[in-house]
Image (cartoon, rainbow, N blue to C red):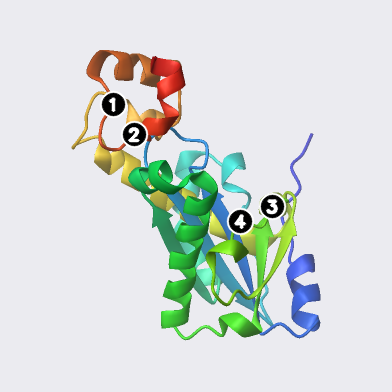
Amino acid sequence: MAVADPTLAVERALLRSGARFVIGCDEVGRGAIAGPVVVGLSVVEVGVRGIPTGLRDSKLLSEKRREELAPVARAWTRYTAIGAASADEVDSIGIIAALGLAGRRALVELHEAEVAIHESIVLLDGAHDWLTPALTKPPRVQTRVKADRDCASVAAASVVAKVHRDRIMIDADSVHPGYGWPGNKGYGSADHYAAIASLGPSAMHRQTWLHERTA
């Protein structure tokens, strides 16, 4: 079955409703056992057009194609921002709060770029709004299941966030070698768990996520 390309239909409807910007929002690394969780934001405005050829949810793209598309996605959107929460923070406050923390950090980056966040709508992938509870004065947040597949701004955010996080994990391999992070990117493959059993967990691992598997 052919994969449908994302469109701007949802974003344009939100912009017609009076939003200054639509801020596509997606996270990567939620299910990993090592490394940070990362939130990407991609901002579009009235008049946006010309969705980059081949732009899709990062999960539907090869690593090579994501690397090619990330700078294109950054150039296409009005602004992009990245926020991260470390493995230690995931252990300390839990994954949902860590998602919110990473999202808040990304929004601070947009605020510092003078994006009118409170005149905007955040289009958040998924059914659960994990962002609003992390903010003192949240903007309007609209959740949408499969927004990363269907909405171009969210697809752009997913690609930018995925490439950013992948590079973190690839670079970490030189500091904590032996876990296969260039290949598994911190997710729980059989070889990754075998490396943990042999080497023990590293400072990049989410320690609270390993107890059940390694006990």
Place of residue 42 in the rendered image (x, y in percent of width and height, measured from the top left): 55, 67
Between the C-alphas of marks 3 and 1, the distance is 31 Å
**Which residue has dot 3 on it?**
128
Q: Residue at x 71, y 59 (%)?
A: 151
What residue is disc 4 on? 130
Say if 152 sits above or below 136 in the image: above
Q: Which residue is mark 2?
A: 205
Labels 2 and 4 touching (C-beta < 8 A): no
Separation of marks 4 and 1 at Cα, in angstroms: 28 Å
C-alpha separation, residue under disc 3 versus residue under disc 4: 6 Å
Left or right: 17 in relation to 165: right
Tag of residue 201: 1
> Residue 183 sits in which quadrant?
top left
Up the image or down, 19 lies above or below 209; here it is below
Q: In the rendered view of the protein, which quadrant contains the N terminus?
A: top right
Residue projecting furthest to the left: 175
Crowd tier of the residue under label 3, counting other residues whose Cα lies within 10 Å: few below 14, some 14–19, many 20 or above = few
The one of 68 and 129 positioned closer to us in this rendering:
129
